[in-house]
Structures are given as C-alpha cells and as structure tokens.
Image: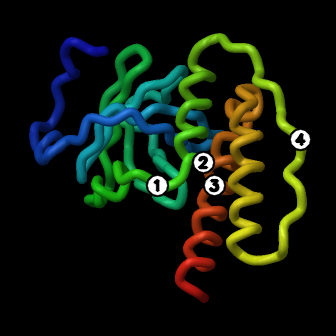
Amino acid sequence: MLNTLPAHDAESRAGHRSNVFLAATLVMAGGSLAVRVRNISARGALLEGPQLPPVGTVVDLTRGSLVAHGTIAWHSGDHCGVEFDADIDAECWTRRVGHKGQDRVDQMVAQVQRPAAAAAVSPVPAARADSLAAISADLVETCERLAARPDLVNACATELQALDAIAQRLRNIAQTGP
C-alpha cells in the first residue's frame, strides 16, 4: 500500500472515502483492464492494478451496471487516483450485490493479479424450466464457471461483468415483474 499519496487539489480528496476491495474495469481509448478499487468517494477512487494509464488519461470506471467517467489524476507504481467528472453515489458502488456471482468475479480478478493454475471447469448446468428466474440462475452459474478461468477473466473482464449485470437484471425482473 502507498505510504503517501501524491499531492494534488485538496478539494478532489474531500468527502468520505470508503475503504474497499472491489473488482472493476478501467476502460480507456485503446482498451480496458481489470483493476481493484481500494477506496472510493463521490469525487474519485484509488485504483490498484498492473499497467495503469498515465496522468491525464480519460477513463470510465465500470462495475457491473455502474459507470463513472473521469480522468487519471495521479499515478504511482501499481496505484492511481481517478477524479470523477461528476459526483457518484459511492454507496451504490460499495453495496453488496446480493449474490455470489459478483463475489466470484471479485475473487477471480484478485487471482489474476497473482500466479494461479486455471480452475477446473464444471459441466454445463442441466436445463431448467424456462422462467426468468431459472434463466438468471443458469446465467449466474455460467458466469461463475467462466470467472473460474483466470485466462478468461484477464481477457474478458468487461464482458464477464456485463453478463453478471444481465443476470442481476433478469433476477430483479423475475422477482418484481416486468
């Protein structure tokens, strides 16, 4: 962890910061990469990950269906600070998703950061009766199997998060109705 943060506008660091360990994707011109959000506030976030972009890079930080637009404000080693263009609801970013699918994606992104053998892939789930709840459950199981493959998490982090967000939306529709 960093002992000191680079000096920059004190106003951008104002407000309550939540210390977290969340998987997210940093999207910029030319690509995206899996990162860990170490703390987050309404105006910015501290990110950790390999090959982070330089200061001044315009980025989107995504986690499931959440997106925050911003700019890299500082960069030091494998940490950087993102200053958001507009205030975000940090509580939404730190709220538990309510299912083990995101936990599994979070674990796999952390695993990609260290050497690990690829986990064995479980067989395709048995077909269930067609309902939104069953389709959502099948999609969550599929996401979990994909997230168990560090090579896929590294190559397709954004797509895995999108699939997880779709599963959440299907589950919510099944529970509340269209």
Q: Are marks 1 and 3 in contact (CB under 8 Å)?
A: no
Amino acid of disc 2? Gly
Q: Earlier in the sequence, mark 3 or mark 4?
A: 4
Label 1, residues with CA under 10 Å away: few <14, some 14-19, many ≥20: some
Q: Secondary structure at mark 2?
A: helix
Residue under the image location 22 percent in, 22 percent down: 6
Q: Are marks 2 and 1 in contact (CB under 8 Å)?
A: yes
| Inter-mark Cα distance, 1 to 3 | 10 Å
Q: Nearer the observer, disc 3 or disc 4? A: 4
Could you say where residue 14 lies in the image, as x and y percent from the top left?
11, 44
Direction from residue 49 to residue 162 in the image, left or right:
right
Q: Earlier in the sequence, mark 1 or mark 3?
A: 1
| Inter-mark Cα distance, 3 to 4 | 19 Å
Direction from residue 45 to residue 14 in the image, left or right:
left
Q: Secondary structure at mark 3?
A: helix
Residue holding disc 3? 164
Residue holding disc 2? 101
Could you say where residue 138 lies in the image, as x and y percent from the top left?
76, 58
Residue holding disc 4? 123
Mark seen at residue 97: 1
Residue 28 in which image quadrant: top right
Amino acid of disc 4? Pro
Residue under the image location 60 percent in, 88 percent down: 178
Label 2, residues with CA under 10 Å away: few <14, some 14-19, many ≥20: many
Q: Earlier in the sequence, mark 3 or mark 2?
A: 2
| Inter-mark Cα distance, 4 to 2 | 17 Å
| Inter-mark Cα distance, 3 to 2 | 7 Å
